[in-house]
Image (tube, rainbow, N blue to C red):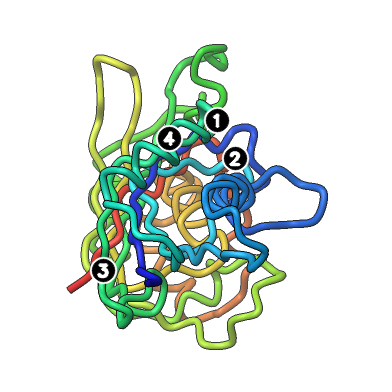
C-alpha cells in the first residue's frame, strides 16, 4: 500500500543549482528523486514535493519535502535507506509517515530563514561558501532600530527580484531579529514569516546592511514599501549566507 513520507533534510547548497529539478543541473530534488526511485525499483516515477525552492548556493538546516512510496517500509528504514544513497552534502535528519492530507508546500504556515554576514576585512576562505561578506563599517544599533519596520504585513514589491512569477507581493513577517556573534565576527539575521518572495530575504539583508553603513535612512523600509520599486532597494546579498532554518506546520 502506498504511504506518504514527510522528510526533513539538511544540505550544503554550494554545489547544488537550487532545490527544484532542472535539466542537466545537479539539484536537491534531483538527487532525492534518484535515490527514492532506486529504492522503489518500479517503472512509475516518484516525484518529491518540497516546501519551497531554495536557489543555487542557498543552504538548508531543515528543508521539508514529501513523497508517496509504493512499498511498506518503516520511517526509520526510509531514513537509513535514503541516507545510504545520498551524497555527503545532503542528509535526511528526520522521517515520518503522514496522512495523505499532508502537503509539504500547501499545508505550511510559515518559514524561518537565517542569514550570516562575515565581518572580516577580507573574505575568509573557510567562510566564503557559507556567509555573505561585508567589509564596510556597520552601526549595529541602526540596524536594530530598523528591524521593527521589517515586521508586520507589507507589500514587498521593492524586495522581489525580477523573474518572480508571483503577482501578489503582500507578505507578513512575524519576527525579524539581528544579533552579533562576536566570537566568529559575524552578524546573524533571522526572519520568520508566512512566506517569502524570490530573493526577498537577500534583498532585505542588503538594505539593512546599507542602513547600518549609513547609506540609507534608518526607516527607509517604510519608504520602500510605498514606492514599490525594486531598483530603489538596489543590492542583493550573496546566496552563500542564506539558510532555510525551519518550516512550520500545524
Label 4 SS: helix
Label 2 SS: loop
Give the CA distance from mark 2 to mark 3: 30 Å
The foreground one among 187 and 92 is 92
Tell which circle, 2 or 1, labels the residue nearer the N-terminal end.
2
Q: Which residue is mark 1?
A: 87
Image vertical order of residue 216 relative to residue 228, above or below:
above
Give the CA distance from mark 2 to mark 4: 21 Å
Q: Which residue is mark 2?
A: 57
Q: Which image quadrant: the C terminus?
A: bottom left
Q: Between label 1 and label 3, give the one nearer the viewer.
A: 3
Residue 226, percent from left and from top = 47, 81
Residue 24 falls left or right of residue 90:
right
Labelled disc at residue 83: 4
Image vertical order of residue 224 relative to residue 217, above or below:
below
The foreground one among 207 and 88 is 88
Residue 150, percent from left and from top = 32, 65
Mark 4: few/some/many CA within 10 Å (<14, 14-19, 20+): some
Amino acid at each position: 500500500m502506498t504511504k506518504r513520507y514527510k522528510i526533513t533534510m539538511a544540505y550544503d547548497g554550494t554545489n547544488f543549482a537550487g532545490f527544484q529539478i532542472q535539466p542537466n543541473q545537479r539539484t536537491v530534488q534531483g538527487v532525492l528523486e534518484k535515490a527514492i526511485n532506486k529504492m522503489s525499483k518500479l517503472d512509475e516515477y516518484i516525484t518529491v514535493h518540497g516546501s519551497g525552492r531554495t536557489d543555487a548556493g542557498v543552504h538548508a538546516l531543515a528543508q521539508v519535502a514529501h513523497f508517496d512510496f509504493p512499498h511498506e517500509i518503516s520511517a526509520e528504514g526510509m531514513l537509513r535507506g535514503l541516507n545510504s544513497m545520498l551524497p555527503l552534502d545532503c542528509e535526511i535528519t528526520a522521517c515520518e509517515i503522514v496522512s495523505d492530507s499532508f502537503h509539504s508546500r500547501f499545508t505550511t504556515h510559515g518559514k524561518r530563514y537565517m542569514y550570516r554576514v562575515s565581518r572580516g576585512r577580507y573574505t575568509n576562505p573557510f567562510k566564503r561558501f557559507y556567509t555573505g561578506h561585508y567589509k564596510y563599517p556597520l552601526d549595529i544599533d541602526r540596524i536594530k532600530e530598523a528591524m521593527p519596520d521589517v515586521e508586520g504585513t507589507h507589500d514587498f514589491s521593492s524586495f522581489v527580484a525580477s523573474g518572480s512569477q508571483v503577482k501578489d507581493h503582500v507578505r507578513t513577517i512575524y519576527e525579524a531579529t539581528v544579533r552579533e556573534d562576536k566570537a566568529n565576527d559575524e552578524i546573524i539575521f533571522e526572519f520568520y514569516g508566512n512566506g517569502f518572495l524570490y530573493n526577498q530575504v537577500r534583498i532585505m539583508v542588503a538594505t539593512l546592511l546599507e542602513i547600518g553603513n549609513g547609506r540609507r535612512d534608518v526607516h527607509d523600509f517604510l519608504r520602500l514599501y510605498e514606492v514599490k520599486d525594486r531598483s530603489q532597494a538596489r543590492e542583493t546579498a550573496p546566496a552563500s549566507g542564506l539558510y532555510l532554518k525551519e518550516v512550520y506546520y500545524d
